[in-house]
C-alpha cells in the first residue's frame, strides 16, 4: 500500500490537461488583475505584476489528485500564499466559503477552511517556469489538500461568502462541495 496515494487513485507521470473551454483569450499582462470581493473589509483589484513582484512568494511541492482517478507526484508551484490575500482583503470572521471565477468561464467553490491552509496559493509559476498557458496562465489557485478540479486555472476573482450560495461548474454537476481526496469526496 502506498500511503501517499489517496483511495481509488493511481499515479501517472504528467498531469492531463482538462479544460471546459479552450476558446478564450488570455488578456495582455498589463490588463490582468486579480479581484478579491465578497464579505471582506477591503475589496481588492491587484495587478498581476504586483503579485509577481510581491516580497512574499512561496514555493511548495505537492501531489496533484484528479477526481477521475489519476495523481501526479511532486508538482512545484510558486506564488503568493493565501495568507497574502487574507491579510490584504481581511475576510469577515463569518466567512465560510470561497467562490472562484476564471477567464474560460470556469468556476469552483470550496470551504474557506481549505483556502486558509498554508499550502494553498495563487500560483504564477509551475515547475520553475511561468505557468504555461494550458496549466493556467496567468494565475491559478492551487489547493493541494483538495481534488485538482478545485485548483482553478486562469483565475480572475476570488469571492468570500458566508453561505454556500454560489455553486461551481463541477459542483453544479454533482461533484462534492468539499472534495477532500483523503475522504474520497468525489460526488455530493
Ligand atoms: N479554469 C479552469 N480550471 C480548471 C479546469 C478547467 O476546465 N478550467 N479543469 C480542472 C480539472 S477537472 C483538473 S483535473 C485540473 C487539471 O489541471 P491541468 O489542466 O493543469 O492538468 O484543472 C482544473 N482547473
Ligand atoms: Mo479533474
Image (tube, grey):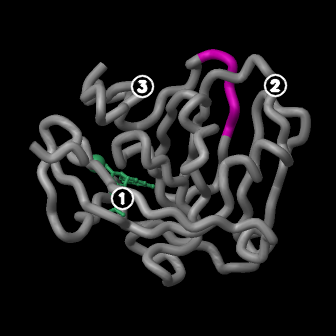
Residue 105 seen in render = no
Q: Residue at x 71, y 57 (%)?
A: 34
Marks 3,2: beta carbons within 8 A: no
Marked residue nearer the N-terminal end (3 or 2): 2
Number of callouts in the render? 3
Furthest residue toward bottom: 129
- Hey, which quadrant is residue 141 in on the image? bottom right
The x, y position of residue 95, in whole percent, is 71, 23
Residue on which the image places disc 3: 177
**Residue in the foreground of this view, choosing between 146 and 40:** 146
Crowd around label 1: few <14 · some 14–19 · many ≥20 (10 Å): few
Residue 141 seen in render = yes
The x, y position of residue 138, in whole percent, is 57, 71
The x, y position of residue 179, in whole percent, is 36, 31
Residue on which the image places disc 2: 92
Is ligand 1 less than 8 Å from the beta carbon at label 1? yes
The x, y position of residue 108, in whole percent, is 48, 39
Distance CA(mark 3)–CA(mark 2): 21 Å
Amino acid at each position: 500500500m502506498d500511503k501517499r496515494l489517496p483511495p481509488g487513485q493511481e499515479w501517472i507521470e504528467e498531469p492531463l490537461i482538462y479544460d471546459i473551454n479552450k476558446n478564450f483569450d488570455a488578456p495582455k499582462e498589463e490588463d490582468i488583475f486579480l479581484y478579491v470581493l465578497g464579505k471582506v473589509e477591503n475589496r481588492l483589484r491587484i495587478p498581476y505584476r504586483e503579485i509577481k513582484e510581491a516580497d512574499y512568494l512561496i514555493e511548495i511541492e505537492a501531489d496533484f489528485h484528479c477526481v477521475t482517478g489519476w495523481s501526479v507526484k511532486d508538482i512545484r508551484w510558486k506564488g503568493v500564499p493565501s495568507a497574502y490575500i487574507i491579510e490584504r482583503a481581511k475576510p469577515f470572521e463569518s466567512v465560510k466559503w470561497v467562490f472562484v471565477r476564471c477567464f474560460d468561464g470556469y468556476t469552483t467553490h470550496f470551504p474557506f477552511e481549505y483556502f486558509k491552509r498554508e499550502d494553498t496559493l495563487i500560483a504564477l509559476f509551475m515547475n520553475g517556469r511561468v505557468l504555461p498557458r494550458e496549466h493556467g496562465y496567468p494565475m491559478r489557485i492551487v489547493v493541494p489538500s483538495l481534488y485538482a478540479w478545485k485548483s482553478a486555472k486562469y483565475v480572475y476573482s476570488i469571492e468570500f461568502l458566508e453561505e454556500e450560495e454560489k455553486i461551481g461548474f463541477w459542483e453544479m454537476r454533482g461533484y462534492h462541495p468539499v472534495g477532500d481526496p483523503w475522504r474520497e469526496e468525489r460526488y455530493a
